[in-house]
Image: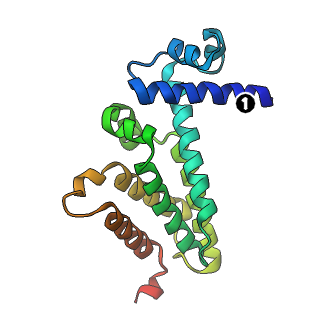
Amino acid sequence: MTSMRKREDAILDAARQCIEAFGVRRTTLTDVARRAGVSRPTVYRHWPDISSLVADLLTRELRAVFDACALEADEATARERLIHQCGGTVGALWAHPLFNRFVDTETDVLATYVFHRFGSSQRAALGLIRAEIEAGHADGSVRKEDAGRLARLVLLTVQAVTTSRRLVADTLSDDRLLEELRLLLDGYLRPLEATR
């Protein structure tokens, strides 16, 4: 099992290198196999096409960002931890070469996940967000509303800021935009009686 996981990671690493260098449209499973030093059938055994490979690659990369941001969050309340994690995730994605490649040249791939359906990485993010919201219900730092609904709105807000920062670059620096995101999320999640 461990050797299979290592092989899958090596293939995903090769896919990341190919996509960063050439883009999704110009990357083939053959290119990935060659770069990973494995046969084409080995790649096809795990991924039937480049789309499924890209989806798994994005999930792995985004999950690593989410997990790293969660480890850094040590605030007292769940709401504060969630806001820290969201801001940290956005900042890390802005600096991530693969994510930037998608924003710059692979917008049609991103459009599927922005406009049409949640992908596996978004579902993973929803699970993490929902867990913090439920912890916030328990510690009283998040308003008592449906955790699933709150999680989706938080995810959509974070996603919009992550992918659209260039639309406000003329008026907000990245640091200021992150601060505005934190204020927005804090106001949305804070118990209503605490805002009065």
Quadrant of the image containing the N terminus: top right
Query: Is residue 193 shown above or below 42?
Result: below
Residue beneath the point at 63% across and 79% down? 139
From the top left corner, tell me how far across and down residue 167 is, in percent: 23, 53
**Relative to 5, 131 lies left or right:** left
User: Looking at the image, how many numbered discs can be counted on the residues?
Assistant: 1
**Quadrant of residue 57 in the image?**
top right
Amino acid carrying mark 1 in the image: Arg
Q: Closest to the observer: 136 or 19?
A: 19
Residue beneath the point at 59% across and 77% down? 77
Judge the density around disc 1: few (<14), some (14-19), many (≥20) Cα neighbours within 10 Å: few
Q: Residue furthest left?
A: 170
**Relative to 67, 192 lies left or right:** left
Q: Closest to the observer: 29 or 143?
A: 29
Query: Is residue 79 shown above or below 57?
Result: below
Secondary structure under the numbered disc 1 in the rendered image: helix
Where is mark 1, residue-wise?
Answer: 5
Residue beneath the point at 33% across and 64% down? 177
Instruction: For residue 180, say whether it is visible.
Output: yes
From the top left corner, tell me how far across and down residue 106 is, in percent: 35, 32
From the top left corner, tell me how far across and down residue 189 is, in percent: 47, 73
From the top left corner, tell me how far across and down residue 179 is, in percent: 37, 70
